[in-house]
Amino acid sequence: MTAAILLEGVQKAFAGKTALSRLDLHVPRGAMAGFVGPNGAGKSTGLRILVGLLRRDGGRAEVLGLDPDRAALAIRRRTCYLPGETNVYHHLTGAEFLEFALSFYPRRLDDVADELTATWELPLARKVRTYSAGMKQKLALMATLLPDVDLYILDEPDRALDATARLFLREVLHRLNLRGKTILLSSHHLAEVEALTSQLTFVIGGASVPGDRIEAARAALRHVVRIRLRRSDASLPAGVRTRSVEADGTLRLEVEGDAFSWLHAIDPKDLDSAELGATRLEDLYQQLTMELAE
């Protein structure tokens, strides 16, 4: 399938400090892709390069078949970009801001406009300066999602949104993707990314994580079990170390050797719940960042 986004070995430095050392990213047309990594990993820098707000120092970049260093305006006519640090014009009303933002695009998704307007019920007649942080984020999202374009690049779209608004946004993005729209989503709410996307790119320390390293992290997680005990003084079999204790008392443990055999050796009367073999995105994220720190 033709790529909507193609980055190969992209590099970027600011005042001699490396922000991107080797960023590779491939997003097929019509895909919903996730872009995740710790703070300072280079995610926002990579997204700004895609829409021509920053020029790369090296490597290859194509967006919708165009080079963002040479055809940034043509790319932005077919792309909507939501920056991670959202700014809206406070002296305008919500309606005036939307009209201004949408005036750059010839076509709008009227059904999406109706749905967002009805669900979020923003006071569009009021000045934006009176809006809360969550209301400003919803306004910025409306300005980003209402144009009828080929590609949506969203940097932390769920910032300042409550759980209900995040779930609604998830539904809207899913329906846009079903229409064939390509969406690249960066977020620290890993559960949202995991629920929505069909592919993931991890970026750590300015470089995308190679597939073999991700597979090695998945293999390491096969030795990790989650258990919750019925009593705090229950004894555990040897050959284990505690990775973390979660808020509800669940233990994340790393087992030497076969994790299933170790789990089987626990007295069932002491065990309230157990999980083995599940690789959550958040676990994979933590494993990769932990390996970087070592």
Image (tube, rainbow, N blue to C red):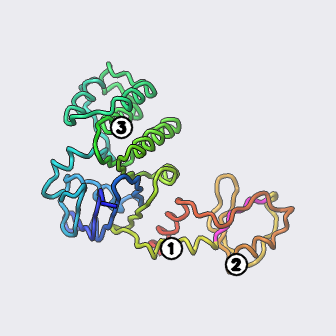
Front-most of residues 12 and 236: 12
Q: Work out how far the residue at label 1 is from the one at label 2, CA to CA, in angstroms.
A: 18 Å
> Residue at left 28%, top 57%?
45
Residue 244 is left or right of residue 137, and the answer is right
Q: Work out how far the residue at label 3 is from the one at label 2, CA to CA, in angstroms.
A: 47 Å
Amino acid, disc 3: Leu
Of the numbered discs 1 and 3, the one sitting upstream in the chain is 3
Q: Work out how far the residue at label 1 is from the one at label 3, CA to CA, in angstroms.
A: 35 Å
Secondary structure at numbered mark 2: loop
Q: Which residue is mark 1?
A: 215
Q: Is residue 158 above or below residue 21?
A: above
Front-most of residues 132 and 151: 151
Q: Count how many numbered circles sit on residues in the image.
A: 3
Q: Which residue is mark 2?
A: 258
> Residue at left 23%, top 63%?
61
Crowdedness of circle 3 by 10 Å Cα count: few (<14), some, many (20+)? some
The numbered dot on residue 145 is none
Amino acid, disc 2: Asp
Q: Which residue is mark 3?
A: 141
Q: State the extent of the magenta-drawn residues as a range.
A: 224-229
